[in-house]
Amino acid sequence: MINQEMQKKKPIVAASTWGHPFDASTYSGLPRTIFSRLAQEDSLCGAHNLIPGLFPSLMRGRIRSTTIFAPWKCPRTHAIWRYLPSNIEYMTKFMVGVEMFREADVVFQFGVAGMPKPGLPLLAHIEYPIESVFKTETYATNYGFSGLSDAVQAQAIAGERIFTDRCDLIWTNTPYTSGLLQKSGVDPAKVRVLTPPGNFSELTLGERDWTQKKILFVGRNWAVKGGDHLVRAFEILRKIEGEASLTIIGCDPPKSVRAMDGVHCLGYLSMDEPSERARLLEEYRTSTVFCMPSNWESTGMVFMEAASAGLPVIMRRIPETDALYPDELFQKVDDDSPEALAELLLQDLQGGAAVTKRTEEASRFVEENYGLDVFQCKIDDLLREVATLSPS
């Protein structure tokens, strides 16, 4: 009887997130997309930031003491900290005293960390298992997971397993990441695949000035997102299209790149700040081509956003996202050849009927498969499902 009732109504959710649940920088704004709607519908009883405060972080070694006088770009915290079993146990004990967990039907958590008490169903989002992070050199190096001893890596893998064993359902973004979770030992019966949408529901198809020859790059990590590859291709392109420009948003490329003719660096634009959000949206609307030849992606939400805005999209072919974006709708460079990428850029910068048709079809594809309404309905289904399960 209880299960039937849960299947009909939305359960009351406690949001638990590694980072502020309503901050646009937390998990690419995905928790905010989900939890803000649940709050509007009175289905959210509370939201909890799992990151410990400054004092416990210092006492328990989360903050790197060696970076006090280091350059600002150096990681300030130990990225592996929240995966270690002793820290998971510490955060779990801390969560016992949080009121919202006593009012919730389910906990919806982003990130491996502390866990709610037994008896409360847990749905967790895990993008990429930690064992795969260690094996992916580009990701590990650029996100603070490199240089760890075998013993520490083994502890982190064990900590994540403690967490995944406690979960009742695990949501991951793609079939590719689902396969990685299962290879790491997660029970496949727990895993659900749901690809998230982009962050800008207000992006729509519109008139585009193809004479602008303006390339847009939006990415947080220059190296991981293939920034150097794009710049090499841009240098080749400028010899043919002397008026072409490149706008870089979201990261801080090397000084040599910032000094190049035709390159405009806008830095990080916050989606939480109205004027910066408006500027970012304007760049999507006024650019001619979107290009981000990432070396690694879990999902590539910016590709969806660019397609929604009617931009032709160029990416690198990588295993993680190849099945998400059809070749006939999204141009892909097969390797790190700047000449091959420059050729694709030149084709799309010309515009024309074929490019326009492709952008229109790509926009429809994104809306039908990764649209916000489609996504929210599937999130509701996940919450109803986990609410009916007997807690692990």
Image: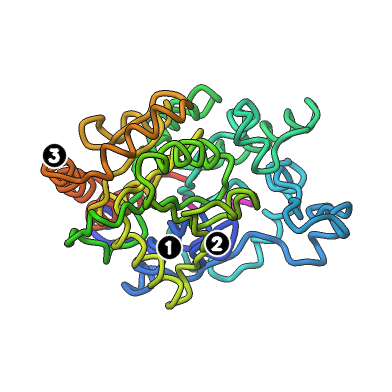
- Label 1 or label 3, whichever comes before in sequence order: 1
Q: Is residue 98 visible?
A: yes
Q: Residue sitting at 21 percent across and 59 percent down?
A: 208
Give the amino acid type for the residue marked by disc 3 in the picture: Ala
Q: Secondary structure at mark 3?
A: helix
x and y percent of residue 48 in the render?
57, 66
Question: Of tags 1 and 3, which is closer to the observer?
Answer: 3
> Mark 3 to mark 2: distance in Å?
33 Å
Q: Considering depth in this image, is 286 or 82 the residue closer to the camera?
A: 286
In the figure, 126 relative to 64: above or below?
above
Are there few (<14), some (14-19), or many (20+) residues within 10 Å of tag 3? few
In the picture, the disc for residue 109 is none
Question: Of tags 1 and 2, which is closer to the observer?
Answer: 2
> Mark 1 to mark 2: distance in Å?
35 Å
Cβ atoms at labels 1 and 3 below 8 Å apart: no
Q: Quadrant of residue 133?
A: top right
In the picture, the disc for residue 13 is 1
> Mark 1 to mark 3: distance in Å?
46 Å
- What residue did someone put label 3 on? 354
Majority secondary structure of magenta residues:
loop
Give the amino acid type for the residue marked by disc 1 in the picture: Val
Colour scheme shown = rainbow
- What residue did someone put label 2 on? 267
- Label 3 or label 2, whichever comes before in sequence order: 2
Q: Residue sitting at 54 percent across and 24 percent down?
A: 185
On the rendered structure, is 276 left or right of 88?
A: left
Q: Quadrant of residue 357?
A: top left
Q: Which residues lie in the magenta part?
A: 114-121
Q: Secondary structure at mark 1?
A: strand
On the rendered structure, is 74 left or right of 360?
A: right
Question: Of tags 3 and 2, which is closer to the observer?
Answer: 3
Q: Secondary structure at mark 2?
A: strand
